Amino acid sequence: MAKTESKVFPQNWNDWFEKSGEPPFELLSEEQEAKKKEEEDLNTKYLRLAADFQNYRRRVESEKNEIYAFANEKFALDLLDVVDNFERALLHAQECQDRQFAEGMELIFKQLLDMLAKNNVREIDSLGEPFDPNMHHAVMMEEADEAESGKVTKVLKKGYTLNERVIRPAMVAVAQ
């Protein structure tokens, strides 16, 4: 019987792979595993990059909101000096001979305070409150029989907040 080569299964597999140009099954699975691992690595890198970008977008949005919320801080601080001077002038409004002028000044002052309140600039209530170094700047200690130790007894200069953040602490006297 003559030895013939089977068309379905070759006698020598290595010869068949060399002739066909295809790698053996073992090498094929190693290449597939390498490609699969490479795809997983790329997918992992993509997911990390997407998460980093999402975190970046949130951080930028948060910073932008903070910039909008406190953009007027310097302007408000400058305006508070005008408010202080207005208050000092209105303390002497009773001495003014022109009563209509004094009333007009009081109305303008009220309008100024309303405008500040509309823009979230609020006065810090300090008198009689416990001293808080985040809200108050103690400039003196004094003996006070009617107040407990550590309580604010006098407000020498009013403090203000902008959007719940202190922009100017109140200058106060504190009971010993």
Image (tube, rainbow, N blue to C red):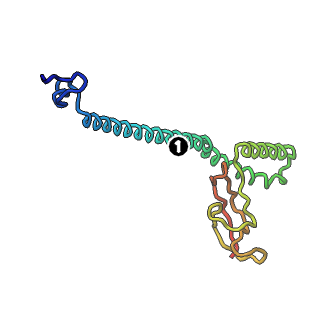
Q: The N terminus appears in which quarter of the rendering? A: top left
Q: The C terminus appears in which quarter of the rendering? A: bottom right
Image side of residue 29 versus residue 173, left or right: left
Using the image, determine if residue 92 lies above or below residue 29.
below
**Looking at this view, is 80 or 15 the one in front?**
15
Q: Measured from the top left, where is residue 114 in percent x and y?
A: 77, 44
Residue at x 15%, y 22% (from the top left corner)? 4
Snapshot quadrant of residue 133:
bottom right
**Looking at this view, is 147 or 96 the one in front?**
147
Q: Helix, strand or loop at disc 1?
A: helix
Q: Measured from the top left, where is residue 139 in percent x and y?
A: 63, 67
**Looking at this view, is 25 or 112 the one in front?**
25
The kind of residue tagged 1 is: Arg
The residue most toward the left is: 2
The residue most toward the front is: 1
For label 1, the residue is 59
Q: How many marks?
A: 1
Residue at x 49%, y 41% (from the top left corner)? 56
Residue at x 68%, y 56% (from the top left corner)? 159
Q: Measured from the top left, where is residue 64 in percent x and y?
A: 56, 40
Q: Dot 1: few (<14), some (14–19), or many (≥20) neighbours within 10 Å? A: few
**Looking at this view, is 173 or 133 the one in front?**
133
Snapshot quadrant of residue 38:
top left
Q: Measured from the top left, where is residue 42 in percent x and y?
A: 38, 37
Image side of residue 164 versus residue 42, left or right: right
